[in-house]
Each structure stands twice: as C-alpha cells, then as structure tokens.
Image (cartoon, rainbow, N blue to C red):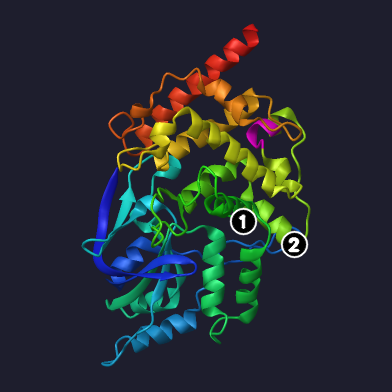
C-alpha cells in the first residue's frame, strides 16, 4: 500500500536525458526521505578497493563550516540539491495541478520502501549535513530525477560535479567511466532503450526513460527502472560483483551447470557480449504475449494492466520458467510460436487484464504470476505426456 509522504508544487523540465522536476522542500523533510549513497572503500584481504555507492565521503570539516554558516543572518543555498527516486511507484506528478507527490510503500521484501529509502542524494549531501549540524531548517531548491537506474545516477553525479573543484576529478571521471562501462545494469538499460526505440518492437515508445512521459509520445505505460529491475536477475545474481570485475578488467564467469543456468538463463549471452540476443529473446517473448492478448495489449485505457507495471512484472516473473520449458539455451532461442504454444493453454481473456481482477500492488502481481505459472505447468504436463 502506498502512503503519501510529501506533496509540493513542481515544474517539469524536459532535456535529452528525459523529464525531471524542480521543486522546493524543507531540509528536515528532504533529510527524512533521501539518503546519500556514499562511495566508500573497504579494504579486502587482497587490499583491493570495492566500489560501493556513488557519493564521496562526507567531509567533517566541510560539514562543520556549513553548520556555522547556516546560522548567519544572510545564509543562502541557491543551487539545487539533486535527488533520484529509483522506484516509479514512489513518485507521482499530476500534470493538471502541477503537484509532485512522494510515497512510501508498505509491502514485503524489495516491495517495501520505507520513508528513509524513497530517494538517493546525487548532489548536496554536505548542505543537508551542514544544516543538521547547525540545527537549522531551511527551504531548499530540489531537482528530482524519477525512476532512474544506478548507471544513470552515476552519470548524473559525475557530469554535475566534474567541473566543480570541491569534488575530486578522479572520482567524477571514475564514475563517468563506470556509468558508460559494461555491467549487468548497463546491459538491461541498453535492452530497454533498444526495445523502446525500435519500430515493431512490442515496447516501441512504451518505456518512460525517467519514469515520466515523453512530450508528444502517447502510450508510455512502463518505467525504464521497472524494466531493468525485472530483467536483471536473469543476467546476474551478483550484479555489483560483476560490475566491479568488469570495471577492473576481470572476466566474469559464465554459467556451466544446469542449476546455475536455471537461475540465470540469459547470463551467457551477457558474458559473451551478445546483448542483441537478449533483446531478441525478450522481444519474441512479449511478441507472443502481444499476439495472444492483442486486444488487451493495444487497449490504451488506464485500467488495463497487461502493459503496465503489474502485468509486465508478472510476465517477467514467469519468463525464466517459460524459457526453460521450451528448452531455451545458448544454442536455442524459442520462437514467438513456441511461446504461443504455452499461452494457448491459458484461460485468461483480454478483458481480464484490469485492476479489478488484478489489484494494484504486489497482491495483483502475485495473483497474475500464479495464473501464468499454472499455464506453463499445464504446458509442461502436456509436453511430458507426449
């Protein structure tokens, strides 16, 4: 269940990266919903530094100086604190009223997002820390990037800070390289962008780059962050480790056993840099969904969920099961017809993909996932019976 935490008037700003929002928020509220994803280094047994997070360490001296400054009579912070809201369900912009609303989510596991975890600070952590040190509450300009993955967070942090002397240029350049380097997240990001940009794709002009609609484009129903998070587990179970190994020039391991393959069936395509094959596989899988439930897929009404978060996530939850049921492998990519041979056993109708049948939130997603899993199981039973 979503709970509204904060509402404010906001201005949407559209640039090549997508649409973000500029608003105002008092420092106490901002501190309560946003945390700094600090880039810290931990020494391992081999004295190799591990990359964690994207921010630099908090400087105690700088924090104290800001804490002293905020109590001066003419203290001011005219530049924006930049934050990212990774989960598209935690942010909503009403175009009619111009109101931006932040939400916490009461759920289970990864679907539970507490107030303190709604956003990450990309720039401005020292300002917030200094205000807290000076026991001062002040309105701040805030730039909000919605539904943004870690690669883009790193890129924004690096580009915002590269020209600033207060930030170590090595850190900014390192992060800029990281954002552009090969990683599981980067591959999922590129797959999403490719499927959204290619005519004929089941997701052509369907994926919102930063969680908000692109001006002049109708039918964007799915956030890029949702797409990336849903695809990522099929490529890597340890994305941070893969990311760091690749950054250091270390070859990441392929899957070799059946058990490993069942957990990450698309991993070897990633390891061998065949990202185009991953795009093709996801394209074919959802082409079959589109063909089986074409009326629901093309229905633009708000209440239709097949091409929205719950519908997409449910079909992605079942993707691995369907892929394996069709003997999918590095050498065999199931065709659209192969997947249709599974979906023909489903008793779901086009009109069933609505919010009344599958409620918003995790309960609706779980129910649809269960229905789809049952369909794949029926297919497997028929297949084994010959």
- Furthest residue to the top? 385
Name the residue beneath numbered marker 1.
186
Name the residue beneath numbered marker 2.
248
Q: Position of residue 331 (x, y in %)?
A: 76, 33
Residue name at image x 74 percent, y 50 percent: 273
In the image, residue 207 sits, relative to residue 159, either above or below, namely above
Q: Give the image quarter of residue 26.
A: bottom left
Closer to the camera, 261 or 306?
Answer: 306
Left or right: residue 94 versus residue 88 is left
Q: Check disc 2: other Cα within 10 Å, few if <14, some if 14-19, many if 20+.
A: few
In the image, residue 368 sits, relative to residue 10, either above or below, namely above
Q: Give the image quarter of residue 139.
A: bottom left
Residues drawn in magenta? 261-265
Task: State the separation of the CA atoms marked 2 and 1.
Answer: 16 Å
Left or right: residue 213 versus residue 38 is left
- Furthest residue to the left? 97
Q: Which secondary structure dominates the residues rendered in magenta?
A: helix
From where the camera sits, is residue 22 visible?
yes
First in residue order: circle 2 vs circle 1 = 1
Q: Position of residue 364 (x, y in %)?
A: 36, 33
* Magenta-colored stretch includes residue 257: no
From where the camera sits, is residue 56 visible?
no
Dot 2 lies on which element? loop
Dot 1 lies on which element? helix
Residue name at image x 53 percent, y 85 percent: 166
């Amino acid at each position: 269940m979503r709970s509204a935490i904060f509402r404010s008037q906001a201005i949407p700003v559209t640039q090549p990266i997508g649409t973000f929002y500029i608003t105002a928020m008092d420092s106490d509220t901002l501190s309560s919903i946003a945390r700094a994803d600090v880039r810290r280094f931990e020494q391992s047994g081999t004295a190799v530094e591990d990359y964690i997070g994207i921010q630099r360490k908090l400087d105690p001296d700088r924090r104290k100086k800001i804490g002293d400054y905020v109590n001066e009579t003419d203290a001011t912070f005219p530049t924006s604190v930049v934050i990212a809201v990774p989960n598209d369900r935690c942010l909503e912009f009403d175009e009619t009223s111009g109101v931006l609303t932040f939400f916490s989510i009461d759920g289970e596991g990864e679907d539970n997002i507490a107030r303190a975890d709604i956003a990450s600070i990309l720039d401005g952590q020292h300002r917030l820390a200094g205000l807290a040190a000076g026991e001062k509450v002040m309105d701040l300009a805030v730039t909000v990037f919605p539904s943004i993955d870690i690669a883009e967070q790193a890129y924004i942090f690096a580009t915002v800070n590269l020209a600033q002397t207060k930030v170590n240029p090595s850190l900014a350049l390192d992060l800029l390289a990281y954002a552009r380097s090969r990683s599981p997240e980067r591959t999922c990001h590129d797959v999403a962008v490719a499927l959204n940009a290619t005519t004929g794709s089941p997701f052509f002009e369907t994926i919102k780059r930063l969680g908000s609609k692109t001006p002049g484009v109708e039918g964007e129903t799915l956030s890029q962050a949702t797409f990336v998070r849903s695809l990522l587990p099929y490529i890597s179970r340890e994305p941070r480790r893969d990311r760091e190994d690749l950054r250091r020039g270390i070859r990441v391991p392929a899957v070799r056993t059946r058990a490993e393959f069942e957990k990450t069936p698309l991993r070897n395509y990633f390891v061998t840099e065949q990202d185009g094959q991953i795009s093709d596989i996801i394209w074919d899988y959802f082409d079959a969904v589109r063909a089986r439930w074409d009326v629901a897929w093309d229905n633009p009404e708000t209440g239709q969920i097949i091409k929205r978060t719950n519908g997409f996530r449910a079909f992605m939850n079942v993707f691995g099961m369907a892929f394996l049921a069709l003997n999918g492998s590095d050498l065999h990519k199931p065709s659209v017809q192969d997947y249709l041979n599974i979906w023909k056993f489903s008793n779901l109708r086009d009109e069933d993909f609505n919010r009344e049948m599958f409620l918003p939130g995790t309960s609706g997603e779980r129910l649809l996932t269960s229905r789809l899993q049952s369909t794949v199981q029926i297919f497997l039973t028929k297949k084994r019976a010959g």
